[in-house]
Image (cartoon, coloured by chain):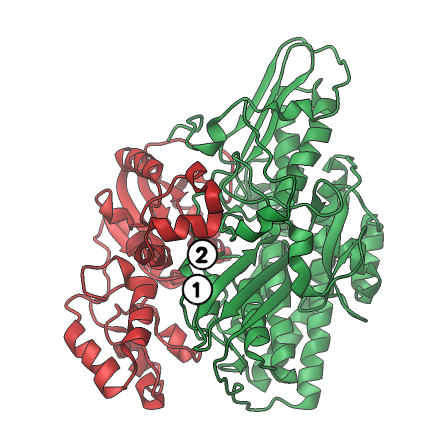
């Protein structure tokens, strides 16, 4: 039998909820572990060294020092996978970028702000090339399993290129816009089975923009058709989609 | 990635003169100098370092608990956000305690906007808190602590050596995940909890099934208790007089609401939390520290047990007796055992809550109608790692003007340091590996959730009435 591929988990600024989803695989996790060798998984075990076949990296880059560490991980890894919204699209962490360091640093640390180093939050791909992305906040456990299997088989992982609305219709939900509420499902990449809408909330956009999302049409739907204010739309768009080139 | 590489700005100012405050070491003859440098402690959530240096005379030169986690500025990010999404943002403070953060956030919002959720909503929220408690405690005990007690580096080898015990724990944890899924709709960052009510409620059939599964899991919990009872001798017998802080409420083991209680201080309403937490900053940590009556205090399962043990469910009280856990307990390592006792309590109490819900009938309720108004509110919830406070001030459009989140692990950081200060001199005669294990186990016993503890708060107002200000831990 061929040597088992070595995988590793790393994290930057984030809630580690995505690694938690992997721990939540329970019995299935033990099956996966039968096919790989764990290089580093700080949340679960002690010890570990590179190089790695697959490195899963969670969290956003928020300090210049993070860049060094991420580049070192990149250099030691054949495949680098961004895990979860903070790593793939910058996620919640990017909300602070709109405030500017002059505001957010003193807000939290007062006049001691200079003790602590930080800069605008950004996703992994802003610093190093990323080979695959597992979207979501938190990630979908089934999608993690599928992507990991595809990577272990040497295939390029497949990602849905259609918006959440497709899966939401399949789930049989009533459209949020029918209730006069905002929802980002119209422009967000699918793959989550529209779980937030199914559970009574709205789509927050945690999986990033779907390819070729029509932002003009989205703005028309949200502001002119649903009649929500510019500020409400902006709030929602800036929650997860802060690190995009589209005007927010 | 080199494990030895230092990567923290404030933390790098070594060596700290902390040892000067530490009690003098017993002059144990030690052959050579010892250095323990645990960079990025494993099997905890987030990044923390333990640095211990003992010279060849057995004197402790350095003994430090460092938190270099990247700060995330949640309080700043909340500025200007609407009350409809604040709980979803704060949920992302921590993956493990996402439910607790949402509940504290909702309480603060409801307090500020003058909303009272229905009784059914309160029961469902209490259930979700129990679910999270089970999720978190079982993860900590089974995956993070048990390897230390059985002398291995992770849970993975246990799949071969202790298959039966491990599958038992995994089954319990899977149930806790199903529990949260049933009540809140998702195990992490749930979507059903909203201001004023629930966006969706579980069905009667789902609740009946959950109740049955919980009742069936009691045997598994007893098995887990027996397992930990058999290896609890591995927990070091270390004691230090400590102040314990947690919620207390009339007639219940307070988790969802109550007043702030302390083993050394008077009870206070939650809105006066700043009198207790009194946060201050130290350069070795991006997280803030707290102190009340003593130099530091402890929150968490052990604090709750010490304050509320009379209200434990019958089986939980029995398990506590079997494990030899007696209040007041001053051994921080026994926090692990207190967590196990709480797992039993949460299971039993959840069964009772589901019964109450089914007896009174599950109603289709619409969330309370909310009219934004200016106001300030506080939420205090016991999350797995201890008492959590959220405090918001809203403007008249329902947007945040000021936000403050005080996280349990933050309140524990100072206590971890003081425990280390007291314990390390007594370890001078041991080998480096043994010191590393003992200190790591101590930190793990607190179940620190460092990634959330670093989202610190606005301390400008606090510094003025905090005469001692900031402790400088620089050489």
Q: Position of residue B288 (x, y in %)?
A: 56, 45
Contact check, label 1 and label 2, Cβ < 8 Å:
yes
Q: For marks 1 and 2, give the one nearer the viewer.
A: 2
Q: Quadrant of residue B97?
A: bottom right
Q: Is residue B399 left or right of residue A72?
A: right
Residue bearing mark 2: B74
Whichever of labels 1 and 2 marks the residue nearer the N terminus, that label is 2
Residue shown at the point (26%, 43%) measured from the top left: A79
In this image, B205 relative to B199: left or right?
right
Tell me the element at label 2.
helix
Examine the image and state in which quarter residue A63 appears: top left
Q: Circle 1 — which element? A: helix
| Colour in which the image shows chain B | green
Mark 2: few/some/many CA within 10 Å (<14, 14-19, 20+)? many
- Tags 1 and 2 on a common chain: yes
Q: Is residue B269 left or right of residue A194?
A: right
Residue B191, placed above or below residue B22: below
Q: Which residue is mark 1?
A: B89
Residue at x 65% of width, y 39% of height = B468
Q: Residue B338: in sight, yes or no?
A: no
């Amino acid at each position: 039998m061929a040597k088992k591929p070595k995988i590793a988990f790393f994290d930057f600024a984030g809630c580690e909820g995505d690694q938690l989803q992997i721990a939540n695989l329970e019995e299935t996790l033990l099956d996966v572990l039968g096919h790989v060798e764990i290089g580093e998984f700080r949340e679960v075990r002690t010890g570990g060294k590179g190089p790695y076949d697959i490195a899963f990296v969670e969290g956003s880059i928020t300090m210049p020092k993070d860049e060094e560490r991420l580049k070192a991980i990149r250099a030691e890894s054949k495949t680098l996978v961004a895990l979860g919204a903070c790593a793939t699209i910058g996620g919640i962490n990017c909300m602070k970028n709109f405030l500017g360091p002059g505001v957010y640093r003193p807000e939290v640390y007062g006049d001691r702000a200079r003790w602590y180093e930080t800069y605008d939050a950004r996703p992994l791909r802003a610093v190093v090339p990323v080979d695959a992305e597992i979207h979501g906040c938190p990630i979908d456990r089934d999608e993690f399993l599928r992507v990991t299997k595809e990577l272990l088989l040497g295939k390029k992982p497949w990602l849905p290129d259609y918006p959440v609305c497709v899966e939401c219709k399949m789930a049989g939900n009533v459209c949020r816009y029918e209730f006069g509420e905002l929802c980002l499902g119209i422009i967000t990449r699918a793959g989550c089975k529209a779980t937030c809408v199914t559970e009574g909330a709205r789509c927050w956009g945690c999986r990033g923009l779907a390819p070729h999302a029509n932002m003009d049409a989205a703005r028309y739907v949200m502001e002119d058709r649903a009649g929500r204010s510019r500020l409400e739309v902006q709030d929602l768009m800036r929650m997860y989609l802060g690190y995009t080139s589209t005007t927010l | 990635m080199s494990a030895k590489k230092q990567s923290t700005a404030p933390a790098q100012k070594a060596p700290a003169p902390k040892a000067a405050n530490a009690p003098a070491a017993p002059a144990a003859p030690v052959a050579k100098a010892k250095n323990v440098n645990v960079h990025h402690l494993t099997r905890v959530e987030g990044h923390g370092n333990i640095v211990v240096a003992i010279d060849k005379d057995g004197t402790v030169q350095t003994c430090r608990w460092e938190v270099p986690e990247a700060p995330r500025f949640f309080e700043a990010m909340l500025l200007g956000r609407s009350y409809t999404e604040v709980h979803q943002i704060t949920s992302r403070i921590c993956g493990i305690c996402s439910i607790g953060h949402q509940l504290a956030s909702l309480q603060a919002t409801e307090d500020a906007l003058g909303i009272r959720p229905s009784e059914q909503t309160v029961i469902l929220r209490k259930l979700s808190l129990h679910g999270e408690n089970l999720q978190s405690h079982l993860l900590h005990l089974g995956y993070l602590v048990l390897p230390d007690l059985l002398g291995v580096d992770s849970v993975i080898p246990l799949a071969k050596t202790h298959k039966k015990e491990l599958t038992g724990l995994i089954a319990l944890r899977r149930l806790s995940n199903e529990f949260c899924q049933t009540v809140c709709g998702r195990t992490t960052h749930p979507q059903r909890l909203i201001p004023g009510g629930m966006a969706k409620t579980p069905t009667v059939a789902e609740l009946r099934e959950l109740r049955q599964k919980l009742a069936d899991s009691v045997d598994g919990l007893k098995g887990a208790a027996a397992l930990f009872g058999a290896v609890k001798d591995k927990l070091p017998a270390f004691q230090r007089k400590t102040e314990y802080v947690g919620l207390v409420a009339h007639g219940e083991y307070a988790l969802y609401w109550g007043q702030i209680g302390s083993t050394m201080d008077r009870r206070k309403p939650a809105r006066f939390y700043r009198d207790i937490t009194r946060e201050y900053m130290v350069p070795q940590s991006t997280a803030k520290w707290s102190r009340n009556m003593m130099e530091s205090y402890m929150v968490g399962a052990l604090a709750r047990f010490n304050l509320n043990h009379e209200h434990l469910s019958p089986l939980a009280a029995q398990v506590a007796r079997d494990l030899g856990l007696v209040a007041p307990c001053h051994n921080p390592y026994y926090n692990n055992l207190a967590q196990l006792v709480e797992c039993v309590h949460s299971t039993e109490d959840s069964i009772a809550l589901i019964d109450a819900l089914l007896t009174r009938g599950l109603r289709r309720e619409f969330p309370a109608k909310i009219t934004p108004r200016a106001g300030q509110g506080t939420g205090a919830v016991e999350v797995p790692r201890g008492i959590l406070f959220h405090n918001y001030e809203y403007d008249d459009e329902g947007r945040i003007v000021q936000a403050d989140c005080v996280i349990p692990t933050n309140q524990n950081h100072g206590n971890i340091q003081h425990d280390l200060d007291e314990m390390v001199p007594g370890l001078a005669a041991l080998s480096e590996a043994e010191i590393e294990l003992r200190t790591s186990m101590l930190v793990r016993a607190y179940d620190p959730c460092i990634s959330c503890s670093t989202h610190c708060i606005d301390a400008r107002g606090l510094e003025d009435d905090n005469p001692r200000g900031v402790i400088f831990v620089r050489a």
